Amino acid sequence: MLGNPTSMMREAYSLLHEGTLALAEAEMNGIRIDVEYCEKMKRKLGKRIALWEKQLLQTKLGKVWQKEYGKKLNFSSDTQLADILFNKLNIKSKKLTKKNNQATDAEVLEGINVDGIEILIKFKKANKNKNTYLEGLLREQVDGILHTMFSLVMAITYRSSSQHPNFQNFPKRDLESMHLIRGAIYPLKGFQNLGVDYSSVEVATGCFYHKDPTMIKYVTDPKTSMHRDMALQLFILETLDKKHEGTEENPGELNLYQGAKNGFVFPEFYGDYFVHCAENLMKWAKDVILKNGMPLKDHMKAEGIGTLSKFTEHVEAVETDFWENRFKVYNKWKEIWWQEYLEKGYFDMLTGFRCQGLMNRKQVCNSPIQGTAFHLLLWAFTEMNRQLKAKGMKTRMMGQIHDEMLMHLWPEEKEEVFQMCRQIMTIEIRQRFSWINVPLNIEADLTDVDSAWSKKKGVKI
DNA sequence: GGAACTCGCCAC
DNA sequence: AAACGTGGCGAGTTCC
């Protein structure tokens, strides 16, 4: 096959070749780190961690732990923790690990009521932030500049990966961790930090493959909304209250639209099923209040759904409707795509990559979508980098997170860069890849000059 | 003393 | 029938 590459495969190779060069330039440009801040916060966290360890020893959990392990006591050891909780304190974990051991993850710990457990939870989070992130930044930076690396040859899906440190998993959703870690990360001196990302790009990319008319309508017609419709169906409502509508993110505020999106639609796309969705949705929505002041719980009860098992039945019906009626063409595509893989032993992505090897059904149906979605961003990233240099502009590439490109923006070039992003990411990309069958939309975040990544705000692009 | 494994947790 | 996809990485543990 390599001796006689098709033109598609040459194109695929070229995408990675040019992409690698563009990413290498971003690596060289680097990211500015506030080293003193990192050291200060590391010391601060270190003190807190030491204090919590001391306090833990005064709690029931700590006392039992110390009695059992003495000098070998290690509050970072989940093996020891599991022994103490599940053998010594006779608690039962609500979850099992992959290897069928009782899990000790954050969710399990949150549900356990033992003196000291809250301190342990704080201890674990602080350790993660200190050891993984702050120390990672300090270790990898050179003269205050971080040259994190991107690879296009690691991920089985032909997505990218990032190392030393991983630029793609700095905390974002947990606001405390977000401020702590992203507060250390700056644009180059005199620049702003700009991030431009594709909205729901995996949903759009799915349409290139399955061409489901209902999904295409959702993605194309701004008057429609898949997540809103699913929220209405899941929570048996006629309309959504304003605060439960749309994608506006108010951290801390429970929003039915976001709930349907993250608790049902995406898990279903990735291959999860109604039992998990029902459990998670129920837990997540327990404190939601509707506009008329009625707790969502009471509303559901009035609709005949007062228990988890009733809700699970309901979500099962919603799931059946989701795949058999609403997105039946998508569902059919998954089956055909899988059968073709079984017959041929490989499948080809629209971007020209051939995926071979032993894969399960979910991998076979997810990989082409994940990989292709990333390739759109990669092409745009490469093109943006090329045009910035060709025009002799000062703005330069900083990094990439699967569906988002990050730049050091030279303030005077803002309008031109915005225009280039719109042009490349939504228009030129459709000339480059003729199989794109729905409009692509972009969103942007921006910091002030010399301001930390944590201070980023949405901006119209 | 290092390789390999497990678990947990961060991102999309 | 069964039931969440892709990564990196730190810490603890076990094995050689």
Image (cartoon, coloured by chain):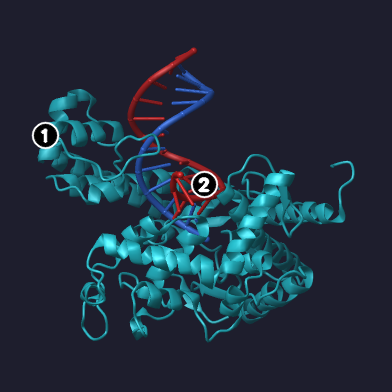
Chain colours: A cyan, B blue, C red
Dot 2 crowding, Cα within 10 Å, few <14, some 14–19, many 20+: many
* Numbered disc 2: secondary structure: loop
Seen as rendered, the residue at the extreme right is: A4
Where C15 falls versus A165 (above or below)? Answer: above
Q: Amino acid at mark 2?
A: Pro
Horizontal and vertical percent position of residue A458 = 48, 76
Q: Is residue A6 left or right of residue A73?
A: right
User: With A348 as the anchor, is A207 left or right in this view?
Assistant: left
Asked where in the image residue A299 lies, by quadrant, the reply is bottom left
Tell me the subunit letter for badge 2: A
Seen in the picture, residue A331 relative to A364 is either above or below; the reply is below
Q: Residues within 10 Å of mark 1 (few under 14, many from 20)?
A: some
Label 1 sits on residue: A63
Foreground residue among A177 and A229: A229
| Residue at which label 2 appears | A165
Q: Nearer the viewer, residue A117 or A325?
A: A325
Circle nearer the N terminus (2, 1): 1
Q: Is residue A454 visible?
A: no
Instruction: Tell which tag, 2 or 1, sits nearer the viewer.
Output: 1
Q: Is residue A393 above or below residue A17?
A: below
Asked whether residue A21 is in view, the answer is yes
Q: Secondary structure at mark 1?
A: helix
Which residue does the image show at 28% across and 64% down from the upper left? A310
For badge 1, the amino acid type reads: Lys
* Residue closest to the eye, A113 or A393: A113
| Quarter of the picture holding the N terminus of chain A | top right
| Quarter of the figure with residue A365 | bottom right
